[in-house]
Structures are given as structure tokens and as C-alpha cells.
Image (cartoon, rainbow, N blue to C red):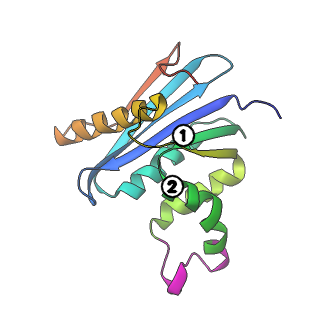
Amino acid sequence: MEEIGLIAYTDGGCRGNPGPGAWGFLLVDRRRGVALERTGGEPQTTNNRMEISAALQVLESLKGSQRIEIRTDSRYLIDMSTKWIPGWKRKGWKRKGNEPVKNLDLVQRLDELLRQHQVVWTWVAGHSGEPGNEYVDGLANAAMDRLARRADPASERRHEVSPVRV
């Protein structure tokens, strides 16, 4: 099997849940050694919305149909993307007990993008020293710091050489 050329690290979080929150991603092109990082956030949101938003943003940044590995510390995001979405769709976007799916706007967008791209999900332990996860955790926290100062949490940076080796 061909090695995956695009690796993305994603993270999202909140200070309070709900509360001010942010997301960050680092997308590394292994073939070229370059990387793209982005952040964003919302003044009132949840941790799960920010985790989903990070994955959405990385997938929306891709051109055409791509094969990508997304590395995240969110089991919720992985389980939702690999196990729960098909069942929710069959049930008319309902969960057990006929409860509506939370964050439906984001979940449906993610479902569309997952059908467009070939995504391999990899769970990484959060706050364990894994370089890519620590990097995007820092991005999300810096975006939350900007929110706390009432500044724009959004940022983008292109790296000629990826700050994380994959």
C-alpha cells in the first residue's frame, strides 16, 4: 500500500464547556516537507464542536479528492466519523432514544467531506509529549488566548519546512 502523503494533526478545546473555545490544525505534506497551520475559534462553544471544527477545517483546505491521515486525541471525533454517522443517517440523524444528533450542522458537513476524501484516523494520546499533538494543542490554546483578549482567534501560517517531523 502506498504511504499516505498528507498527515494532519487536529485539536480543539474550550475554557469551560461550554465557553470560549478554539481549534487548530497542522497539515503536513510529507512528499514536499511543507506544512500549513490554521486556527479559529468561537466565544461560546463546546469542546466537541471545536474538535469537529478542526477536522472540518483541515478537510476543507484540501483541493480535489485526497488521501489523508488525521491524527487526533479525540476518541469522540474518531468514533463519530468511523462508527456513528452511518447509523445516525439511517435513523434520520437521530441517536439512541430518538434524540437529535448534537452539532448536526457540523456532523453533516463532516459526513460530506468524508465521502469526498479517503481519511485514515489515528488516535494519539493527548498531553503525552507526542510532538504533533502538542503543537496543535499549543495552536488551539494560543487562539483561545487571543479570544480572551477580544482579538481574532483566526490565524494561518505556511511553513517551508514542517515544524513537526512526520
SS at circle 1:
helix
Q: Position of residue 101 (x, y in %)?
A: 50, 73
Mark 1–mark 2 Cα distance, whole angstroms, equals: 17 Å
Q: Position of residue 13 (x, y in %)?
A: 34, 48
Q: Which residue is mark 1?
A: 58
Q: Amino acid at mark 1?
A: Val
Rendered image: mark on residue 122: none
Of callouts 1 and 2, the N-terminal one: 1
Residue 75 location in percent, x, y?
A: 51, 55
Pick out the residue farthest to the front: 128
107 relative to 95, above or below: above
| Magenta range | 89-101
Residue at label 2? 75
Numbered circles on residues, count: 2
State if disc 2 and disc 1 touch (CB < 8 Å): no
Amino acid type shown at disc 2: Arg
